[in-house]
């Protein structure tokens, strides 16, 4: 039987580890990206080969340049990421993936509006 002192100690450790927020590093087999609003997404490495992520990385490189230090920021909003992540998890057809890639320019419109509103607020 476990002593009450040991139970309290175990509970404290569990509580302190659970309120740490987002992990500083990704789980094994994943990478971390951030959207234009700063939302954090943990993405499986297998998604790197998808046309959607290739296009997002290409557009992000055009907009932000290649990151030398710090996090990878994608040129899309969190709503788009929440839309494409389940699609990629379900291994959608190439045709549906193409349609999603075609919607990436819409992300750019959102990005431009977001950046314009940020600069307007700061002025």
Image: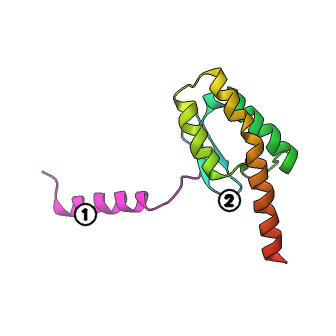
Q: Position of residue 123 (x, y in %)?
A: 85, 78
Q: Position of residue 72 (x, y in %)?
A: 73, 47
Magenta stretch containing residue 21, yes or no?
A: yes
Q: Which residues are magenta?
A: 1-25
Residue at 84 percent of width and 43 percent of height: 61
Vertical order, 4 against 66 (above or below): below
Residue under label 2, please give it. 37
Main SS class of the magenta portion in the image: helix
> Where is residue 31, by image quadrant?
top right
Relative to 54, 97 lies left or right: left
Relative to 28, 53 lies left or right: right
Q: Position of residue 4 (x, y in %)?
A: 17, 62
Q: Secondary structure at mark 2?
A: loop
Label 2 to label 1: alpha-carbon separation: 39 Å
Residue closest to the eye, 16 or 45: 45
Tell me the crowding category of disc 1: few under 14, some 14 to 19, or many 20 or more residues within 10 angstroms, Cα based.
Answer: few
Q: Earlier in the sequence, mark 2 or mark 1?
A: 1
Residue closest to the eye, 65 or 117: 117
Vertical order, 113 against 106 (above or below): below
Q: Nearer the viewer, mark 2 or mark 1?
A: 2
> Where is residue 97, by image quadrant?
top right
Residue at 36 percent of width and 61 percent of height: 15
Residue under label 1, please give it. 8
Determine if residue 75 is in view.
Answer: no
Residue at 85 percent of width and 49 percent of height: 63
Magenta stretch containing residue 108, yes or no?
A: no
């Amino acid at each position: 039987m476990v002593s009450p002192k040991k139970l309290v100690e175990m509970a404290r450790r569990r509580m302190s580890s659970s309120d740490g927020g987002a992990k500083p590093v990704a789980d094994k087999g994943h990478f971390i990206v951030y959207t234009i609003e700063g939302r954090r997404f943990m993405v499986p490495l297998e998604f790197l080969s998808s046309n959607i992520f290739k296009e997002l990385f290409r557009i992000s490189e055009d907009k932000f340049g290649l990151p030398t230090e710090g996090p990878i920021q994608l040129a899309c909003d969190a709503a788009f990421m929440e839309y494409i992540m389940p699609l990629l998890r379900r291994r959608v057809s190439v045709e549906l993936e193409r349609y999603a890639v075609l919607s990436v320019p819409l992300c750019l419109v959102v990005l431009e509006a977001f950046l314009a509103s940020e600069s307007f607020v700061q002025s």
